[in-house]
Image (spheres, grey):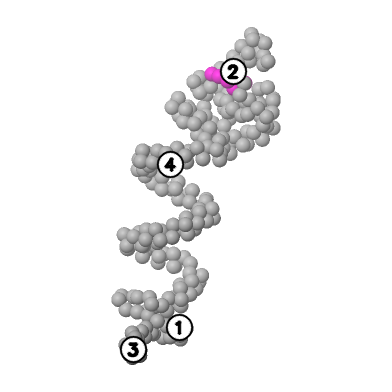
Amino acid sequence: MPHSTDFPIPETSPTKCCTRCKQVKTFDLFGFSEGRLRSQCKACRTEIERLKRLANPEKVRERDRLNYWANVEHERELLRVRRARSPESFKRREDEYRLKNADKIREQKRLSYWRNPEKARQRERNRRINNPDIMRQKDRDRYLADPQTRVAYNRLRKARLAGAEGRYSKRDIDELFIKQAGCCAYCRRSLSLIGIHIDHIIPVVKGGSNWPHNLALACPKCNLTKHDKTPDEWVYRWYVCEGGLK
């Protein structure tokens, strides 16, 4: 049998006493600062940071912001490494943050857009050129989630191209729906059963505006037959000359 000294004897891991919890721990449980081990272990440092954030959230947030922009490339590289290490965890946290701060994110995007609109438009164009399939799918998902908003956007765009002044939002359409009691402005049939079209009472091509007071909710048949006519022209032609709705 070999002598006992022939077997490798494991070296004792170096240890250090944490100045906060007073426990003796191995070096790997301590962080580094300026090339030296910290006096407090990682668990204690985490707890101290948590208490600081609870006591002075604004001050800590400002400190983090200044530190980030002072070392922006390093911070971005760290973020990329962490994201690559646990992508599912990052995605879950991002989704939770977006749900919790939806209004804040929307306002930040709006402010960022109007600070430099041309840059924002160019960025959106580049994104669509570089990722056409992804952007098409996002557009489809957005339309399926809220088709009326997309319809309103397309109508606003057409009105701008035609030189009409004014704009309206989904909220204006919802208020109009309540005002009309959910019925077509012309034939009074229920819009919930046959669908909704947004009609310009005075057509845009005849000088009508795109403000909410020039809008009416109509059923598809009334809107398509009215087309670019004023109400008087349409009523005369459709009801007097052609005998009305069938």
Residue 19 rendering spot, x and y as whole percentages: 42, 85
Q: Are marks 4 and 1 in contact (CB under 8 Å)?
A: no
**What residue lies at 47% left-to-right and 83% top-to-bottom?**
21
Residue on which the image places disc 2: 225
Residue type, label 3 = Pro
Q: CA distance from mark 4 to mark 3?
A: 67 Å
- Percent x, y of residue 82: 40, 61
User: Label for residue 229?
Assistant: none
Q: Earlier in the sequence, mark 3 or mark 1?
A: 3
Disc 4 is placed on an element classified as: helix
Labels 3, 1: front one: 3
The residue tagged with tag 3: helix, strand or loop? Answer: loop
Mark pair 3, 1: CA separation: 46 Å
Magenta residue span: 222-228
The numbered mark at residue 134 is 4
Mark 4, mark 1: which one is toward the viewer? 4
Percent of width and height locating residue 179: 66, 33
* Amino acid carrying mark 2 in the image: Thr
In this rendering, position of residue 96 left or right of residue 219 = left
Closer to the N terminus: mark 2 or mark 3?
3
Q: Quadrant of residue 17?
A: bottom left
Amino acid identity at mark 1: Arg
Residue on which disc 1 sits:
20
Residue 148 in the image: state x and y as whole percent.
56, 35
Say which element carries label 2.
helix
Q: Secondary structure at mark 1?
A: loop
Q: CA distance from mark 2 to mark 1?
A: 81 Å
Distance in Å between CA atoms under marks 2 and 4: 37 Å
Asked whether 159 or 30 is in front, the reply is: 30
Alpha carbon separation for disc pair 2 and 3: 103 Å
